[in-house]
Image (spheres, rainbow, N blue to C red):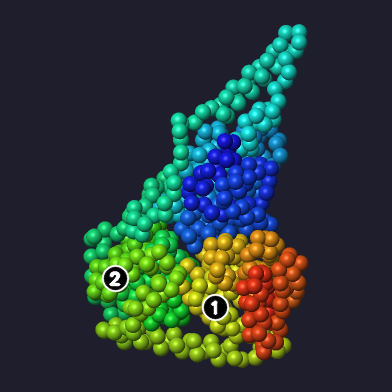
C-alpha cells in the first residue's frame, strides 16, 4: 500500500465514517484510499469548513472528526477552526499535506513551516518522515485527541510518503551516469545521497503492524493516556472518575444545602453515549440546573428542574454552586456571578480550570459527566434505582431517541421536599421572564418588519423531537439562545467559548451527515452568514438538505448597539439587506424571503417542506432592530 492507503486503513479502523476535505495534489492519495474503503469523502469550499464539520461530528458521535487539507494555504485556512476546537475541547484530527521530505526549505510549492504555525493551537502535532511512521503516528493522533482534555491534533504527511513508491522514485529523478566513467564526483555523491534518502523513506515498518480497531469507550470506562500539549510537555490525563472521598464530601455539601444551583457545561457531554444516564442523574439529584453550550437540550424542552433565565441572580443567592464542566471565565464574569457566601464545587477534566479566577471549596479533577452520575448514585440512590438497569442501558445507546426521553421523563416529576420553595422562587422568575419575552415578541418593530423574537418563537414551534440546531451569529443568535428549546441531548451546536463566527456551514454539514433523518437548522446572523454561505454548494452537491434562517437586520448589531452608544459612531457596523436567499439559489439550494410578520409561519413551513423533500433551503428574514439584548457585549 502507498501512504495514502495506509492512512485510509487507519481511519477505517478508528471508526471514521466521513473525511472532510478540499482537494489538493499533496493529499490526493488519502482521498482516493478513503473512498476505496467506503469512507465518505465530503469536499467543501473552504478548508475552515472541513474542520468545523469534523468538529461537529466529534461532538455528536464521540469519535474524533477528521479533515484532510493540502499544504500551505490549505493548512493556514484551518487555523480559526482548529483554535475553536481547541477551546471547545473537541477531538479533531487534521491531516495536513506537505512538501516532499527532501524539498523542505528549498522553495517547493506551498512549503512553509506548518509545524511552527499550528503547534500552539493543538494538543499534539507530529510530522511523518518515513512511510513506516504514518500508521503509528495516526494511531497516536487519535489517542491524543481523545485523552484527558480532548482537543485537535495535527499530523503532517509529506507528499512523497503518500504516493506509490515507483512514482516517488521517478519524482526524485537521479542524474544519469556519464558513459565515460560514472559521472562527476558531484553527480555520484548526489546519486548516493538520493539512494540513501529513498531507503530511509521506504524502510520496512514493524512486522505485521496493524492499528487496533477503534471501540467507543463505554460510559464510565477508563480514560486514555495523557496527551501532549502545544508546548511539547505532557498534560495529565483526567482521572477515570472522582475518588470516594471527593464523592462523600460533595454529597455532604449537597445534603446540607438549602439553595443549590447546578451549571452543566459542554464538557459533561464528551462521553456522548452516556447522555441519557447523565440526564437521569441530574433529575435524580433534584437540584435546579442551568445548561450551557453543548449541554443544552440534555433534559428536553420542559424539565421542571431546568431553568433558562436569570442565572446570575440564582448564582448570587445560592448557598452551594456546582460547576460541572464549565470554568469561571467571562461567561460567569470570572467567578463574580457566584455569591461570596456560597460554597463552590467545581468539576473539570482540565486541572487548571478548577482554580481559574476563583478558588472553590472542593475541586474535583474528573470527567464532569461521570462525577454527576456517581454523585447521584451516592446522594440519591433511591431515585437512581427507579431507572431499571435495562432502561439505563437503552438511554446510553439512544441518548437522543424516544427511549431516552421516556426514561428521563419517568423521573421528571415536580420537585418536592425542603428545596421546593427555593426551586419555586427560581421557577417563578423563569416564568416571568418567559412572559416578558412573549410580550416583546408580540410588539411591532421598526419598518413593519419581522420581530426577531417572534421569528425565533416560530422556529421553535417547528422543531421536531430530533432536530439539531446550529448557532452561528451575534445578536440574532444570542436572541435565539433565550428562546429556542432544544428537544433532546446533543442537539445544539454553537462555537463555544471562542465566540467564532463562520461555524454554520461546516457544523450543519457534519450534523446532517451524522443525523440524516433529522431536521438540521442553521440560525445565521446576516453578518455571520457570509462566512460559510458558499457551503450551500457543498450541501446541494452532496444531497444534504438543511434549513438556514438568516436574521437580516442589515448590520453587525451586537457591536453597533454598544459602539454607537459609547463612541457615537456606527463605522464598520453597517451592512446592506442583501438577498442571501438568491445567493443560496445560485449555489444550488432553494431560497425564500420574508419581510412581513404575517408571512413568517407559512414561509418557515414551506422551508421545512422543501428540506424534507431533499433541498437545502435558506430563509432570508428581514428583521427589525430591538433593544432585547442591550448591554450584552462581552469584552
Q: Is residue 234 above or below residue 291?
A: above
Circle 2 SS class: loop
Would you say 70 lies left or right of 496 here? right
Would you say 276 lies left or right of 172 here? left
The image quarter containing residue 615 is: bottom right
Q: Please name the residue that numbered disc 1 is placed on.
A: 463
Closer to us: 323 or 633: 323
Instruction: Evaluate if marks 1 and 2 touch, with contact meaning CB atoms under 8 Å apart.
Output: no
Q: Give the mark nearer the N terminus: 1 vs 2.
A: 2
Q: Please name the residue that numbered disc 2 is placed on.
A: 388
Q: Is residue 488 above or below residue 30?
A: below
The image quarter containing residue 611 is: bottom right
Residue name at image x 34 percent, y 78 percent? 410
Picture coordinates of residue 170, whole percent (x, y): 69, 28
Picture coordinates of residue 317, whole percent (x, y): 36, 80
Circle 1 SS class: loop
Would you say 554 lies left or right of 355 here? right
The image quarter containing residue 305 is: bottom left
Q: Residues within 10 Å of mark 1 (few under 14, many from 20)?
A: some
Q: Residue lying farthest top?
A: 180
Res. 84 mark:
none
Q: Is residue 21 above or below residue 358?
A: above
Amino acid at each position: 500500500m502507498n501512504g495514502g492507503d495506509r492512512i485510509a486503513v487507519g481511519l477505517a479502523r478508528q471508526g471514521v465514517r466521513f473525511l472532510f476535505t478540499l482537494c489538493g495534489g499533496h493529499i490526493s492519495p488519502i482521498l482516493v484510499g478513503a473512498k476505496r474503503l467506503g469512507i465518505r469523502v465530503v469536499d467543501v469550499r473552504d478548508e475552515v469548513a472541513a474542520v468545523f464539520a469534523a468538529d461537529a461530528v466529534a461532538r455528536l458521535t464521540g469519535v474524533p472528526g477528521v479533515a484532510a487539507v493540502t499544504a500551505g494555504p490549505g493548512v493556514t485556512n484551518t487555523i480559526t477552526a482548529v483554535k475553536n476546537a481547541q477551546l471547545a475541547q473537541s477531538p479533531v484530527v487534521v491531516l495536513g499535506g506537505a512538501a516532499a521530505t527532501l524539498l523542505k526549505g528549498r522553495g517547493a510549492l506551498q512549503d512553509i513551516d506548518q509545524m511552527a504555525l499550528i503547534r500552539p493551537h493543538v494538543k499534539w502535532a507530529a510530522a511523518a518522515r518515513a512511510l513506516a511512521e504514518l500508521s503509528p503516528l495516526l494511531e497516536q493522533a487519535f489517542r491524543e485527541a481523545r485523552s484527558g482534555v480532548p482537543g485537535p491534533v495535527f499530523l503532517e504527511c509529506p507528499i512523497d510518503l503518500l504516493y506509490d513508491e515507483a512514482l516517488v522514485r521517478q519524482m526524485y529523478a537521479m542524474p544519469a551516469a556519464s558513459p565515460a566513467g560514472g559521472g562527476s564526483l558531484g553527480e555520484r555523491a548526489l546519486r548516493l545521497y538520493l539512494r540513501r534518502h529513498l531507503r530511509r523513506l521506504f524502510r520496512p515498518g514493524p512486522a505485521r503492524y496493524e492499528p487496533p480497531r477503534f471501540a467507543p469507550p463505554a460510559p464510565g470506562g477508563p480514560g486514555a493516556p495523557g496527551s501532549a500539549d502545544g508546548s511539547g510537555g505532557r498534560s495529565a490525563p483526567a482521572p477515570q472518575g472522582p475518588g470516594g472521598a471527593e464523592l462523600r464530601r460533595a454529597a455532604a455539601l449537597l445534603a446540607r444545602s438549602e439553595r443549590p444551583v447546578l451549571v452543566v457545561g459542554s464538557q459533561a457531554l464528551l462521553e456522548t453515549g452516556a447522555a441519557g444516564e447523565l440526564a437521569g442523574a441530574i433529575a435524580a439529584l433534584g437540584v435546579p440546573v442551568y445548561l450551557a453550550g453543548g449541554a443544552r437540550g440534555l433534559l428536553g424542552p420542559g424539565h421542571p428542574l431546568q431553568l433558562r433565565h436569570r442565572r446570575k441572580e440564582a448564582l448570587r443567592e445560592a448557598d452551594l454552586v456546582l460547576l460541572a464542566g464549565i470554568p469561571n471565565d467571562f461567561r460567569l464574569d470570572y467567578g463574580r456571578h457566584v455569591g461570596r457566601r456560597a460554597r463552590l464545587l467545581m468539576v473539570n477534566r482540565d486541572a487548571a480550570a478548577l482554580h481559574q479566577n476563583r478558588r472553590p471549596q472542593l475541586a474535583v479533577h474528573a470527567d464532569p459527566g461521570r462525577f454527576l452520575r456517581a454523585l447521584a448514585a451516592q446522594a440519591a440512590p433511591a431515585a437512581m434505582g427507579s431507572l431499571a438497569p435495562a432502561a439505563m442501558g437503552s438511554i446510553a445507546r439512544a441518548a437522543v431517541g424516544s427511549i431516552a426521553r421516556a426514561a428521563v421523563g419517568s423521573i421528571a416529576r415536580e420537585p418536592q421536599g425542603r428545596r421546593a420553595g427555593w426551586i419555586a422562587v427560581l421557577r417563578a422568575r423563569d416564568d416571568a421572564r418567559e412572559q416578558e419575552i412573549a410580550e416583546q415578541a408580540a410588539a411591532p418593530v421598526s419598518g413593519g418588519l419581522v420581530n426577531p423574537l417572534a421569528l425565533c418563537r416560530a422556529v421553535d414551534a417547528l422543531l421536531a423531537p430530533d432536530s439539531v440546531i446550529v448557532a452561528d451569529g451575534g445578536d440574532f443568535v444570542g436572541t435565539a439562545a433565550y428562546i429556542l428549546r432544544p428537544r433532546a441531548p446533543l442537539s445544539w451546536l454553537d462555537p463555544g467559548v471562542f465566540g467564532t463566527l463562520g461555524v454554520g456551514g461546516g457544523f450543519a454539514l457534519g450534523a446532517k451527515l451524522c443525523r440524516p433523518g433529522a431536521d438540521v437548522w442553521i440560525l445565521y446572523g446576516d453578518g455571520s452568514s457570509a462566512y460559510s454561505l458558499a457551503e450551500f454548494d457543498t450541501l446541494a452537491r452532496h444531497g444534504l438538505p438543511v434549513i438556514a434562517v438568516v436574521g437580516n437586520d442589515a448590520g453587525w448589531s451586537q457591536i453597533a448597539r454598544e459602539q454607537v452608544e459609547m463612541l457615537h459612531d456606527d463605522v464598520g457596523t453597517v451592512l446592506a439587506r442583501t438577498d442571501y436567499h438568491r445567493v443560496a439559489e445560485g449555489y444550488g439550494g432553494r431560497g425564500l424571503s420574508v419581510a412581513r410578520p404575517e408571512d413568517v409561519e407559512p414561509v418557515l413551513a414551506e422551508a421545512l417542506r422543501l428540506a424534507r423533500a431533499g433541498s437545502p433551503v435558506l430563509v432570508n428574514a428581514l428583521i427589525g432592530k430591538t433593544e432585547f439584548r442591550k448591554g450584552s457585549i462581552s469584552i
